[in-house]
Image (tube, coloured by chain):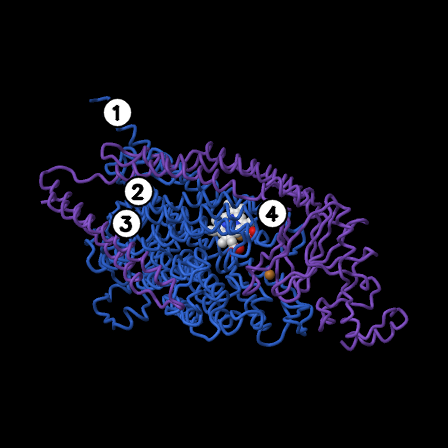
Amino acid sequence: MAFKKIIDSKKLLASLAVFMLLGTNVLMAQTVTADAAAKPGVNWLSVGYYVLLFVLISIAIGVVGKILRVYDLSQQIQGKKGTNWNNIMGTICLIFMVVGLSAAFWDITEQGSMTLPEAASKHGVKIDAMFLTTTCITLFVFVITQILLFSFLFRYKHSDKRRAYFLPHNNTIEKVWTIIPAIVLTVLVIFGFFTWQEVENSSPVKGDINIDVTGHQFAWEIRYAGPDGILGKKDFRLTAGANKLGIDFKDKNSMDDLQADTLVLPVNKVIRLNIFAQDVIHSVYMPHFRVQQNAVPGLPTFFKFTPTITTEEMRRKVDDPKFEYLLYCNKICGSSHYNMQRVVRVVTEGEYNQWLAKQKPYLTPALRTELKLAAADQKKSITQNRLALNN
Amino acid sequence: MSTLAVHDHGVAHHEEGHEHHHDTFLTKYVFSQDHKMIAKQFLITGITMAVIAMLLSILFRIQLAYPDKSFPLLETLLGRFAPEGRLDPEFYLSLVTIHGTIMVFFVLTAGLSGTFSNLLIPLQVGARDMASPFLNMLSYWFFFTACVIMLSSFFVQKGPAGGGWTIYPPLSALPTAMKGSGLGMTLWLISMVCFVASSLMGGINYVSTVLNMRTKGMDLWKMPLTIWAFFLTAILGVLSFPVLVAGVVLLIFDRSFGTSFYLSDIVVNGQVMPFEGGSPILFQHLFWFLGHPEVYIVIMPAMGISSEIMSVNSRKPIFGYHAMVYSLIGITVLSFIVWGHHMFITGMNPFLGGVFMITTLIIAVPSAVKTFNWLATLWRGNIRFTPAMLFAIGMVSFFISGGITGIFLGNAALDINLHDTYFVVAHFHLVMGSAAIFGMLAGVYHWFPKMFGRMMDEKLGYLHFWLTFIGAYLVFFPMHFMGLDGVPRRYYAFTEFASMQRWLSVNMFITWAAIMSACAQVAFLYNFISSIFFGKKATQNPWQANTLEWTTPVEHLHGNWPGEIPSVYRWPYDYSKPGAEEDYILQTTPLSQTMSSNLPHDFEDNPAGLEALNKWTSTQKANEEVK
Ligand code: HEM
Ligand SMILES: [Cu+2]
Ligand SMILES: [Cu+2]
């Protein structure tokens, strides 16, 4: 009886395989023709194929289920015990553990090697060290606990002959496994706390290079201080026309401020990014430097860091001549959130100075006429005042 | 000992009998005030919402796997949201938003707590119904309204809310900032207010039922861990949800009445807005003051359910019952003071960040204790692999895998580079998404006989478990590495960055794993629906469990027990007690009937009983010597 069923199901499985092969062949042919057409309509054939495939698999599963039931029944009639599902599940648990852990290990080596290269900033090195420590500790706990979990399942699967061991509690061991995690976490917290304080401690120091980064939908504006080394004031109410950042040109320091398309940074210098947003929250994310800080409208933020590896060096390290550091947005901000980037280039100090000298000032001729500023406008600051107010 | 719980009125009520009391279709199935029916309503609505949210996720997974490919079928299905057969970027964000909202709130909060608190609190503490059946009914209908409103936003011109499930303003406050901040966002906010109303009514009911309506003998330390978990979850919800309402109402004001609670210094598309003096960070504080407790609102019921099921199916008492309760209490208290870990890099004062880091890593301690106790429960057990047991075990496995990455994220210094990347997505889908869903499924498989009087098919349950369990790991495990490579979440496509294009094959793999897991849910749905009608008839106590719900008849009656409510004499975990005849002893079995298995420990606050036990043992000994 059951035997016949199995043959039946073999036929079924075979026809399933044939169907899949044929179907894929037809589909392949389909895609070729579809490419030729200008605007493909819905390919109902392939939709139907997938639906049918699903139905067939479901039927196959149903048939297998029936066979199992029949088998169990026939065993029962013969007075034997049916399938012992506890043993089967226990064994699958063990297999899952072995295969799962090997797969995890494979994934960690394979995709783990696709992750970010070494930190390109001073504080980033410390963060990476913390990361390594945390990974070692947690990976150890992960492996041990998963092994215990699944091997217990296998080892203590049900048996009618045995009774479980009545063990409601054991205060000693409970204290141990409360205190040990507490200690480990305390250590991690203490290191984390000091690293965090160090990274975030950014009282302004003379000689820091100040750069403004302003996010808006959907781009970053970069503003460098001119020769005076000081960025001028801004006021969002002044935003109009060519003055897209709302720079306050009453402030003398604004006059020589420069705009740039690329965030160019001198290596081994302290950089202070002043971070603003005009419309919604954005986030300045430069993962190679382990830098991230949200850009919040109405709440200026900043991040201080020291790049340590030039773009050239990094290209050699990652063996990719086209490698670029990037700054991109990491807080959902609207339709083009997924493409809001700037190239970041770390160069030597000499190259930096050369580059900076070539950047255009924010106060473009167009803006000058818009604001009705003459070339040497110091004297006309009164008119300018009024203008600013009118804006 | 608490005697609050003796109530005669229930008995009196029952004498009139449910037979005389004619339920119409409307009062029995629709506007039901019976906690068991309301539980089923929550469950079925929850499952429906889960299926919808799952389908949404498949849609956006397809986009991530094939960003350059056109699927004309999508245009047929979605119309203007997928022009040329490709998802619109803003609609992609709406999908992500609604998927998250539905899963977190409608499935894992209402679907989970709503179902099992309603079903189990009266049944396991020994009450005839909830403290306020009417409020209970309202709770369901508010929830249902919230669901309808949330889904209706798919039918407005600009589509549903799109700012992410955390709906940070100003994005969510400025209708001009994105399509999803228009009418769709208004509907989201209204839906959420209804939802919170529902969950408050539910929560108050759960708390008062647990506190006031326990049967004779059921003192707090005799309650099953499920009840402890539901009770603490309800407290958490009652204290934190109102804060979300405050945040939402202020956002409604900012959107519709020109206030500036969250808005300041804003220029949209070159247009200077008049808002001044508000703070977007304020919203984040209000949101996460709920948001973090919320994640524990989601996981604690799953923990309670898994503890119970693991104990029943290991035929062993849960290890360290007291430690389990205290760690739940610890989590409850601590979860109110860690919300800032979602805001380390938002511009919050870094000193505060440091403080939140300390509290966050403290909360990992009770979580670790729970894990170890579960492992110890399995140790030397006699483990029966029912589908419920498998799902409970899966919950533990996911909780470990996902909890461990919490240690990284809770460390502010590490969070700098991990925040808002796929690492976070991996973390919370394992620790919250998968673990809590598994807890919920475990509960469904385990208490299905109690809800519907029939059994679910075990083999289909096995198939469902393994496909889902493996599928979820395949989906979420690789995401860790994307996060470690700095790949941000909520990106419509990874086509614009060379560094992210490398991950395309991984994304394709994840999508197919997700589709496979989604198909596996058909096994569950088929099993669930067909078993309601054609499943094998259940016996009264199919799992040989100790708790009170298995002393009620299989046929449901209004009032739960036909006669008097049984009294309780012992804790719920007397499994495989040495000396006992069977490997389980019902909570309703008095100690006097189990002399051979009593332990001195059973009489800690009962000296007379202890004396009786000593006497009994000495006579036993004497008898043996005579022999
Ligand atoms: C072991 C203890 C845990 C720690 C230390 C921890 C820590 C964290 C931290 C720091 C974040 C913020 C990450 C970021 O956005 O950069 C986070 C995110 C999250 N965690 Fe956990 N977590 C823990 C356990 C849990 C549990 C048990 C759940 C839920 C059941 C959970 C659910 C979430 C969710 C939903 C998010 C993401 C919210 C979002 O941004 O959309 N976590 N976790
Ligand atoms: Cu942005
Ligand atoms: Cu949290």
The residue indicated by pointer 1 is: B622
Q: CA distance from mark 3 to mark 2?
A: 16 Å
Nearer mark to the viewer, of 1 and 3: 3
Q: Is residue A278 visible?
A: yes
> Horizontally, is B469 left or right of B430 in the view?
left
Q: Earlier in the sequence, mark 1 or mark 3?
A: 3
Q: Colour of chain B?
A: blue
Q: CB of residue at label 2: within 8 Å of ligand 1? A: no
- Looking at the picture, do discs 3 and 2 lie on one chain? yes
Q: CB of residue at label 1: within 8 Å of ligand 1? A: no
Q: Amino acid at mark 1?
A: Ala
- Looking at the picture, do discs 4 and 3 lie on one chain? no
Q: Mark 2, chain letter?
A: B
Q: Residues within 10 Å of mark 2 (few under 14, many from 20)?
A: many
Q: Mark 1, chain letter?
A: B
The residue indicated by pointer 3 is: B461
Q: Position of residue B547 (x, y in %)?
A: 31, 48
- Looking at the picture, do discs 1 and 3 lie on one chain? yes
The numbered mark at residue B313 is 2
Q: Secondary structure at mark 3?
A: helix
Q: Secondary structure at mark 1?
A: helix
Q: Is residue A61 visible?
A: no
